[in-house]
Image (cartoon, helix red, strand yellow):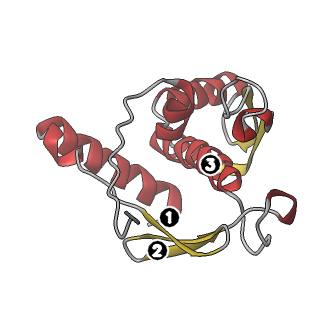
Amino acid sequence: MDTTERIKSTFERNKKALGLRPSVGRGTATTRAMLTQGLHFEVKDGAWSMNVDMSEKSGGTGAAPDPGVYGRSALASCLGINYAMYAAVKGFEISSLEIEVQVDYDSNGTYGTIDQPPGYRQVRYTVVIGADASEDEIYRFVDEADKHCAYLDVFSRPMDVQREVRVVGAQE
C-alpha cells in the first residue's frame, strides 16, 4: 500500500469510527515542563521529550528553541499534515509542500513596559504546494483542511483557559 492510500485508509477508518462513537475522539493530553536551570525547561509528553530555553538576549542560554519556535512549528506542521491528509482523501499525490508561518510580536507586553497583550499582533502563513490536481481542486482541499486544522483553530479562536496554582515549600 502506498503512502497516499495508507493515509486515506486511516483517515476514512478514523472518520467512520468517530461517526459511530464521537466519544472515541475525546480525551485529555498532558504535557509537563520542568525547570532544569535558569530559563531552560525539559518538556515531557508521554514518550516524547524536548527542551525549551530562551535566547541569551532574553536571559537564557540559547541551548534550545524558545516557546515561540514550538508554537509556530505546531501551527506550520499541523497545517501541513492536514493538507497531506485531505489531499490523500481526494486521491491526490503532493509533490511539494512548504508552509511558512510569520508572526509580528512586541516584547513590551512580555516585560510589562506598556499595557498591551504579550502575544502576537498578527499571524500569517503561506502555503506553497504542488500536487497532481487542478488549481481549483488544490484550493478546495486546502480550504477544507484549514477548516479542520486543530492548531489553526487554537491560533484563531479564544478559548477557556483555567489556572490552578499549587505552592510547595513556601517561606513563612
* Tag 2: amino acid: Trp
How crowded is the residue under tag 1: few (<14 C-alpha within 10 Å), some, or many (20+)? few
- 11 vs 62, nearest the viewer: 62
How crowded is the residue under tag 3: few (<14 C-alpha within 10 Å), some, or many (20+)? few
Which residue, given by chain and number where applicable, does mark 2 sit on?
Answer: 48
Query: Is there any visible trace of residue 145 in the rendered image?
Result: no
Question: Residue 130: x and y, percent?
Answer: 75, 42
Looking at the image, residue 80 lies above or below residue 159:
below
Q: Secondary structure at mark 2?
A: strand
Looking at the image, residue 166 lies above or below residue 71:
below
Disc 1/disc 3 C-alpha distance (Å): 31 Å
Question: Residue 123: x and y, percent?
Answer: 72, 30
Disc 2/disc 1 C-alpha distance (Å): 27 Å
Question: Residue 46: x and y, percent?
Answer: 37, 72
- 21 vs 129, nearest the viewer: 21
* Tag 3: amino acid: Gly
Going by the image, does 127 lie left or right of 143? right
Going by the image, does 58 lie left or right of 72? right
Looking at the image, residue 74 lies above or below residue 104:
below
Residue 2: give its label.
Answer: 1
Please tell me which of labels 3 and 2 falls first in the chain. 2
* Tag 1: amino acid: Asp
Residue at screen point 23% across, 49% down: 27
Residue at screen point 36% across, 48% down: 11
Please tell me which of labels 1 and 3 falls first in the chain. 1
CB under 8 Å between discs 2 and 1: no
Q: Residue furthest front?
A: 172
- Assign the C terminus to one quadrant of the image: bottom left
Residue at screen point 35% across, 51% down: 165
Going by the image, does 25 lie left or right of 103? left
Which residue, given by chain and number where applicable, does mark 3 sit on?
Answer: 71
Q: Secondary structure at mark 1?
A: loop
